[in-house]
Image (tube, rainbow, N blue to C red):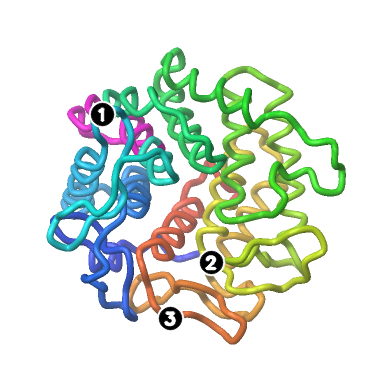
Amino acid sequence: MSPPPPLTHIERLSDGRGIFEHADGISPRVAGGYCLDDVARALIVMCREPRAGNDAARLTAVYFEFLLDAQVHSGACRNRLDPDGRWLDEPDVGDWWGRAMWAFGTAMARSPDSWIQATAATRFDRGAARRSPDLRASAFACLGAAEMLAAKPDHPSARAILIDFVDRFGRPTKDLTWPWPEARLAYANAAIPEALIAAGQHLGDAATLGYGLHLLNWLLDGETTDGHLSVTPVGGRGPGDSKPAFDQQPIEVAAIADACARAFQLTGDARWADRLDLAVRWFLGLNDHGLPMWDESSGGGFDALTATGRNTNQGAESTLAMVATLQHAHRPQATRR
């Protein structure tokens, strides 16, 4: 049985403004400031957390206020905030916009706070006026749209985001040996088939659903070696690249866990539960080095599985990836256990 998802290191990395992006060991690297990417991830984790309490509610409010400040009237978002509260970049529709859309959709669907629900819906609609040319940013926005539609099945801007994603990215390639929509795998890869699965589900589009499941199955066939996950490294992976390859980052495993949980909930096919279990067990030590990728004493997640062991810094992205994955293990409807 996997451990309950710990919130202790998330709390350690957070202050009254957001969650610090980096850490030296377990200590927040305050000078590095914050980024919307991580704060949006943190809000999603908190909204998925069933053990609601005062600390979780406080952090949820902090992260939500960060998202509100990051989004501008046009619907675009700023990403990087310095420790003194100054934005360092201009609003745009990169990955951080997509993750903000995901977080707004999740907050609307899952927060117990009626004010957060209503405000998140308004801000989702504001962001939905924009589109990103980037595949992953668009996929993240789709996952937020799916959250909206799970709560409000006829929500027009959420449906429009899914329709647009399918129109732009939902056509299978003709290469049977490399069906991936890019020349190389990059990062958070499983979010792409998950977005297709979600779009197929909520649009009643069997072809898109089937394509998403096929693409996820192909990805996992390539990410599994000798009964464990051996995921795409930080430099990406293309046809013919050898394995194992490093550094492997926890975000890859968390994306796999999310996608497999969705596939299992939708299909009931036990192979997705088995693959979700592999993602959970990657953090517990079933990986290319046999090393746990979480720190039981701190509640943090290690930043990378490297060629020689682990990067033992415990930053926000890796910790949130670990917690998000363990949340699935304690959600009965997502696994067989």
Q: Is residue 253 above or below residue 297?
A: above
Q: Does residue 112 belong to the magenta stretch?
A: yes
In the picture of the structure, the residue carrying the numbered disc 2 is 249
- Dot 3 or dot 2: first in sequence order is 2
Q: Quadrant of residue 100?
A: top left
Asked if the residues shown at circle 3 and circle 1 are in contact, with their CB atoms under 8 angstroms apart, the answer is no
Query: How far apart, in angstroms, are the residues tagged by discs 2 and 1?
Result: 32 Å
Q: Is disc 2 placed on a helix, strand or loop?
A: loop
Asked if the residues shown at circle 3 and circle 2 are in contact, with their CB atoms under 8 angstroms apart, the answer is no
Residue at 67% x, 29% y is 170
Q: Nearer the viewer, mark 2 or mark 1?
A: 2
Q: How many marks?
A: 3
- Dot 3 or dot 1: first in sequence order is 1
Left or right, residue 275 beside residue 92? right
Query: Quick one: which residue is furthest to the bottom in this view?
Result: 308
In the picture of the structure, the residue carrying the numbered disc 3 is 312
Residue at 51% x, 54% y is 329
Q: Which mark is residue 117?
A: 1
Left or right, residue 97 beside residue 328? left
- Point out the stretch of residues depicted in magenta: 102-119
Residue at 31% x, 49% y is 79
Looking at this view, is 129 or 17 the one in front? 129
Q: Is residue 248 visible?
A: yes
